[in-house]
Every structure is written in structure tokens, then in C-alpha cells.
Image (cartoon, grey):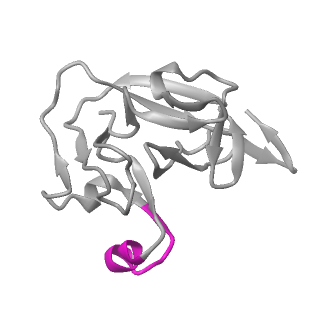
Amino acid sequence: MYKTGLCEGTHVMTLDGNLPVEYLCEGDMVLTRNGARALRRITAKPLKDCPILVLRSAIGPGRPERDLYLAPDQAVHLRDWRGRFVVGSDQRSLPLARLVDNDLIQWAEHPGDLLVYELEFLTQQVFYAEGLEVMSAASPFRVVQGVAAA
């Protein structure tokens, strides 16, 4: 069951502006907390579970910038009191399903044929989806004696 990723229609911050995730291609430069990084791989698969609806500003002012649907196991990055409250740490990434409060973050009805997209970089990154900090997929690339290898 595929339970992680960004639902189609989600805008990702790139050097070319905010683009729908389904428009991204390998090599596109995506803005991350560590600066612009080249997208190494993007994978689209059908979501088999109900998505989670994150209402505008549920995680903080402008985070996300608009209502957003994400897969339940998509990791979001918390960097303020929310992280301390939920997991006891100022900086922490955790699956969105752990933040469901049935108010600002809630389970949504499954819309039918919905694709989710996972973004992969050379190393795992925090990037911006509708202004919300989310984690990229765990990188399949590994480092061997200081050289990245597929």
C-alpha cells in the first residue's frame, strides 16, 4: 500500500517558481532548506489509502499556504513549539498521520484515482510544498568512499 507522497496538484517551490508536482521532471531545481537541489527521481503511484487534508496555516502562519492533501505517511518537518509538544524536539520530521487532530489536520474522503508523487534527491532533503516543509523520499543513492553511487 502506497502511503507517502504529495497528492497531484500540490505546488512545489522550484527555481522556476511554484509548480504543480506532476509538472516536475528529473533535473529540475527544487528549493530546499539547504538551497536549490536537483531532483534525481520523481515517482508517481496511486494512493491506496485516504489522504489527509491539511487546512491553510494549520502548521503555522502560511504553512501551508492553501488547503493541501498529502499521503498519510508523508513526513512533515516541524521546527517550533509543535515539535516540542508532539515529540519533545524543536526540529523533527514525522508522518502527517501523527498530527491528525480532526480539526485543522483531518482524514479526507478518498477521491478515487489519486496519484501521489515522491521526490528524491541525492540526499534526503526538506523542501517546500505549498509553503509547508516536507521531507523528500529516503534517497536510494548511497555514498561509497565519499562518492555518490546509484
Write the start and end of the magenta stretch as one range: 81-93
Residue 135 drawn at (x, y percent): 50, 50
Image-based side of 9 in relation to 108, left or right: right
Residue shown at 63%/55% (left/top)?
Answer: 33
Asked if residue 57 is among those painted magenta in the image, a careful observer would answer: no
Give the position of the N terminus as an image quadrant: top left
Q: Is residue 45 above or below residue 6?
A: above
Image-based side of 18 in relation to 53, left or right: right
Q: Is residue 131 above or below residue 60?
A: above
The residue lying toward the viewer, choosing from 52 and 13, is 13
Give the position of the C terminus as an image quadrant: top right
Residue shown at 33%/43% (left/top)?
Answer: 66
Residue 88 drawn at (x, y percent): 40, 81
Q: Quadrant of residue 34?
A: bottom right
Q: Is residue 23 above or below residue 94?
A: above
Residue shown at 21%/58% (left/top)?
Answer: 100
Residue 138 drawn at (x, y percent): 55, 45
Asked if residue 85 is among those painted magenta in the image, a careful observer would answer: yes
